[in-house]
Amino acid sequence: MIMNKVELLSPAGDMNKLKIAIHYGADAVYVGAAGFSMRPDDASFTIDKLEEAIEYVHSKGKKIFVGINSLLMEDDLKKLELWLYDTRHIDMDAVIVADVGAIRMFKRINPKSNIHISTQMSTANSESASYWREMGAERVVLARECTLKNAHSIAENSNIETEIFVQGAMCVAVSGRCLLSAYMVGKNASQGVCKHSCRWEWEVTEGKRPGESFPILEHDNKTIIFGSTDLCLIEHIPEIVKAKVSSFKIEGRMKGEYYVAMVTRTYR
C-alpha cells in the first residue's frame, strides 16, 4: 500500500534540542518567538537566535516554524509590530499564529509569510478550516478535541494542510476549553452546557498515601487543577496517515534533550 508522505514535526526549546530533533529524523521543527510564545522566554528564541536556528535548519534541508501563539493583549500589539519589522528579512518557513489580529498584522507588514493556524484557535470543522484557507493560511493545527474521523473529514473537504498532535502533554483545558464537565456528567462546556464541575468541593487522594486526602482549594488568586497523562498515538500511525493528515506534531519544547531525541527517533 502506498501511504501519503507525512511530515514529522518536533519541538525545539533551544538550539541543542533543535539540532537533536533534526539529527534524529524530524522533517521540521517548531520554536517560539521570545515574548510571543506559549512557553517562557528561556524556551523561546530571540531574533538573533532565530536567525542562527533558521540557517542551521535550512542547511540540513529541513523546515522551521515559529510560534506567535500567546494571547495578545492591546499592549502587545506595538511590540509585535516592531518584531515583524525586525524579522522581515528572516526566511521563516511558516509562523504559527493564534490571533486574528496577528494574522492581519502579518498580512500588512510581511505579506509573504506562510501562516499556520494554531490549535489555540480551536478549529474543529471543515468550514472553519476553509475560512482560514480563504484568509491565506497554508495549514491548520486542529483542535485537540477532534476525533480521527473529524480530522479525515476536514482534510478531505477544506483544501488546506492539517496538523495534529500525536505525542506529549495534554492540558485539562484542551484547546483552551475545559473537559471536566463533559467527562463527569456528559455536558460539554464547549457547547454551552457546562455544569461547573471544576467548582465542586474536590478532595484528592494519592496512591502511596492511603487514608489521606488533600483539598483542592482556591487561594492567593490561583487554583491548582489536575493535568492528564501524556497523549501517545504511536499505535495509530497507519490510521492517521490514511486520514490524510499532513503533519504529526510532538509536544515538548520544555522537555529534555533525551525526550526530544527518543520520541523523534521512535516516531520516525
Image (spheres, grey):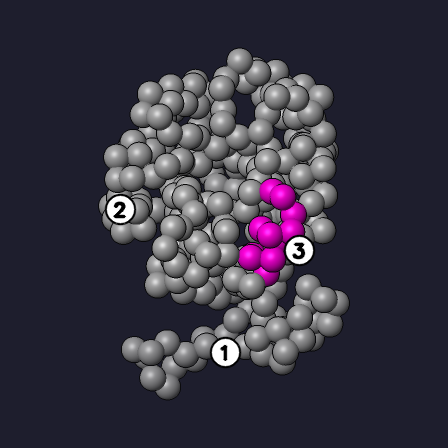
Residue kind at label 1, given as amino acid type? Glu
Quadrant housing the N terminus: bottom left
Residue kind at label 3, given as amino acid type? Asn
Viewer-side residue, 200 vs 247: 247
Q: Residues within 10 Å of mark 3 (few under 14, many from 20)?
A: some
Mark closer to the observer (1, 3): 3
The reply, left or right, for residue 236 in relation to residue 173 is left
Q: Quick one: label 2 or label 1, which is nearer the N terminus?
A: 1
Q: CA distance from mark 2 to mark 1?
A: 40 Å
Q: CA distance from mark 1 to mark 3?
A: 37 Å
Mark closer to the observer (2, 1): 2
State whether residue 87 appears in this view. Answer: yes
The spot of residue 118 in percent (x, y) is 58, 43
Q: Looking at the image, which residue sits at the far front? A: 1
Q: Residues within 10 Å of mark 1 (few under 14, many from 20)?
A: few
State whether residue 219 appears in this view. Answer: no
Could you tell me which residue is drawn at 57 percent across and 16 percent down?
88
Residue on which the image places disc 2: 265
From this view, report whether residue 195 is shown above or below residue 172. Answer: below
**SS state under label 2:** helix
**Occupied quadrant, residue 117:** top right
The spot of residue 171 in percent (x, y) is 50, 58
The dot on residue 125 is: 3
Could you tell me which residue is drawn at 37 percent across and 37 percent down?
27
Residue on which the image places disc 1: 203
Magenta stretch in the rendered image: 150-160
Q: Residues within 10 Å of mark 2 (few under 14, many from 20)?
A: some
